Image (tube, helix red, strand yellow):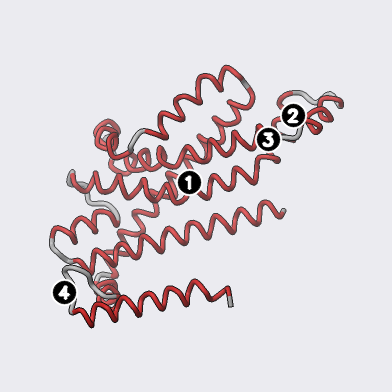
Amino acid sequence: MTRFAPALFGLLTLLAWQGAVWLLHVPPYLLPGPLGIARALLANAGSLSHALLATMLVTVTALAVACVLGIAMALAVAASRLARAAIEPWAVALQVTPIVAIAPLIIVWVGNPFMALVVCAAIVAFFPVFSNTVAGLAAVPPELLDLFRLYGAGRLTVLLRLRLPHALPLMLAGIRISGGLALVGAVVAEFVAGSGGFASGLAYRILEAGYRLEIPKMFAALVLLALAGIAINAALGWLARRLVRE
């Protein structure tokens, strides 16, 4: 029964939403019902699907960049106190800097719209991978470290054979968090780029629908974004379970 609880709750919510829209005679330009959103989704399936692919391409690329940089820098931090002192403050600074504030500058500096969107989304997605990997690398039990040193293992061997495998669950948890953040970063960057005239992904379609007061189409794009976020989270969760189990 618990397996079907999310679907049942979602269905009841949609029925209540549609019933409220009918009973209260809410106009679609204020709040469309699920049926109106479904019709808009079918009517604009072509343009919205292309926009979804564009947003997902930015998201996946940004997540890959964030994973490579985050894990590499975490390994550097674990291997050297000097690297820790040099990298950690800047990593925190990136985390607390609002991407909305710096996205216009990044778009101007990078020039290429796609790469600019990837850079913005990667900045948002970087910190969970980095911080979780650092925490995992530092959480190795002291007795295991002593055992490796007793057998003459060097620093690199300890890092690759002990610290990195021990950090894998936390690292994968960070990657799963970063998957959703990469999507958020891509959407925010697309909003900025769309305002500047760069037609890109679903965020641009949301802006376009808002300007034209096509509110059902706007909600249809939001539904696709939500489904994309759920799919990313589910895929990364499945990958984490497979890797940890093995």
How many other residues sit within 10 Å of disc 3, few (<14), some (14-19) or many (≥20)? Answer: few
Q: In the image, what residue occupies the spot 44% across and 50% down?
A: 60
Say which residue label 2 marks.
157
Instruction: Identify which amino acid the numbered label 4 is placed on.
Output: Pro
Instruction: Identify which amino acid the numbered label 3 is placed on.
Output: Ala
- For the residue labelled by badge 4, is the local secondary structure a helix, a strand or a loop? loop
Label 2 to label 4, Cα distance in Å?
A: 66 Å
Q: Locate residue 238: give its quadrant.
A: bottom right
Residue closest to the far front: 24
- For the residue labelled by badge 2, is the local secondary structure a helix, a strand or a loop? helix
Query: Residue 48: image x %, image y %?
Result: 29, 64
Say which residue label 3 marks.
139
Q: Single out the mark in the foreground, 3 or 2.
A: 3
Q: Single out the mark in the foreground, 3 or 1.
A: 3
Q: In the image, what residue occupies the spot 82% across and 27% down?
A: 146
Instruction: Identify which amino acid the numbered label 1 is placed on.
Output: Ser
Q: In the image, what residue occupies the spot 78% across and 29% down?
A: 145
